Amino acid sequence: MRDLTQGSIPGHIVRMAAPMAIGMLFQTAYYFVDLYFVARLGDAAVAGVGTAGNLQFLIMAVTQVLSVGTMVLISHCAGRKDAEEGTLVYNQSLTLAGITALLTLLLGYTAGFAWVDAIAASSETARLGRAYLAWFLPALALQFPLAAMMSTLRATGIARPTMVIQMATVGLNALLAPILITGWGTGYPMRVAGAALASVVAIVVANGLALVYFSRLEHFVRFDAARLRPHLATWRRMFGIGIPAGLEFGLMFVSMAVVYFIIRDFGPAAQAGYGVGSRVMQGVLLPGMAIAFAAAPIAGQNIGANRPDRARETFFAAIKLGSAVMITLSVLCHLRPEWLVHWFSSDPAVLAVAATFLATISINFLASGIVFTCSGLFQALGNTTPTVISSVVRLGCFVPPALWASRQPWFSLQRLWYISVVATTLHAIVAVALLRREAGRREAASPAARA
């Protein structure tokens, strides 16, 4: 465990954010590798993988429930130096990870294919999306135990092992993807199913490496089979913090589903272009997300140690660093989006949609960074409900105007992206206002204020 209640706050943020950003970049590279080779199969394949991969956001919403609940409670334990309570939370997170993994497989194989059929722009896109999902579901299920272990490390101030694990497994995915997709050396091309299988193998290895690390090198918490038995009081605490955070990602899933629904009338090229652009955007935003992700355990440990002054300092340091990064990335994507998207398709129609999306949506990168940081501080405070409120505001400002505009004769995809920019800006304003209110409420309720 690393003690984050002492030392330089900006130093802690940079030290944790750098390996987090590298690890997250390699994690996103899973999808870039798949996308690069799948793009050689045509627009319908890219669109099919995109529609099936959209379920990743729903899984991310559920993993947020687990990972945020685990990270917050263990970071508070680390701040109090309470290893026994931390060990209980860690083992309960593994129990919940096993349950949710099984549910993912059950629901994915019973309802997932119908979802792909509902949003696909063509029958060929739907067929390829189903083929990809059938093999990709085990990878989605295995996200849960990995999330439990990685969030535990983040809570204790450890970031480098996550980076190393992700680098190693992405390298494995990059090696396997072209072999399985094209049949190089095997004579059996699996096409989109090969992309999914490469991801499955890689995440199996990632889980194995994480287990090795915890068994040999982790000392603050430990595996204890006796503590795997469901402990409902701990579950309630984890769910109370994690469910609102999961709902926040769930609302992002709804927003993306609405976009896919609206643009399906523009054909597979439009869906493929949006899939490429949104994947590139996810990769570009990683440095800002890493800063926010680093801020959460730092503030969490200090709140657990009753150091609200350092938690406040963490917020302002993260805002300054994150804003500088986001503004730089916004300028790059706005001026030269074609540099970032041309790797993933040779179809001019696909590239035009992707580049226009990235250039337009980059206007709200600064607002997105502010939202990420506010979300991280709410997690540290153990009250993630305000993140849902601000996300509902964004959804309400995006979905009704987007659906209305899509029925107008003047509608274009770029107008849809502009609606998203406005909604995200309002999201950031509301998030900051709610964080100020929460901080003021806690300060007024503190023993020092009452005295």
Image (cartoon, helix red, strand yellow):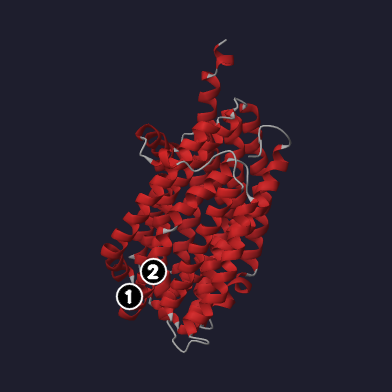
**Residue on which disc 2 sits:** 51
Mark 2 residue type: Thr
Is residue 137 positioned above or below 364 on the image?
A: below
Disc 1 and disc 2: Cα gap in Å? 8 Å
Considering the numbered disc 1 on the image, is that residue within a helix, a strand or a loop? helix
Disc marking residue 265 = none
Task: Report the residue at 56% width, 70% height from top.
Answer: 172
Q: Position of residue 431 (x, y in %)?
A: 50, 40
Disc marking residue 126 = 1
Binning the other alpha carbons within 10 Å of mark 1 as few (below 14), some (14 to 19) or many (20 upward) gives: many
Quarter of the image with the N terminus is top right
- Quadrant of the rendered structure where residue 333 is? bottom right
Q: Please tell me which residue lies in front, 231 or 123.
A: 231
Mark 1 residue type: Ala
Q: Please tell me which residue lies in front, 115 or 333.
A: 115
Task: Report the residue at 52% width, 86% height from top.
Answer: 184
Q: Position of residue 402 (x, y in %)?
A: 38, 59
Determine contact: label 1, label 2, CB under 8 Å: yes
Whether residue 319 is visible, yes or no, is yes
Q: Please tell me which residue lies in front, 227 or 160.
A: 227
Quarter of the image with the C terminus is top right
Q: Position of residue 419 (x, y in %)?
A: 45, 57
Is residue 439 positioned above or below 320 on the image?
A: above
Task: Report the residue at 48% width, 51% height from top.
Answer: 147
Q: Earlier in the sequence, mark 1 or mark 2?
A: 2
Task: Report the residue at 44% width, 85% height from top.
Answer: 189
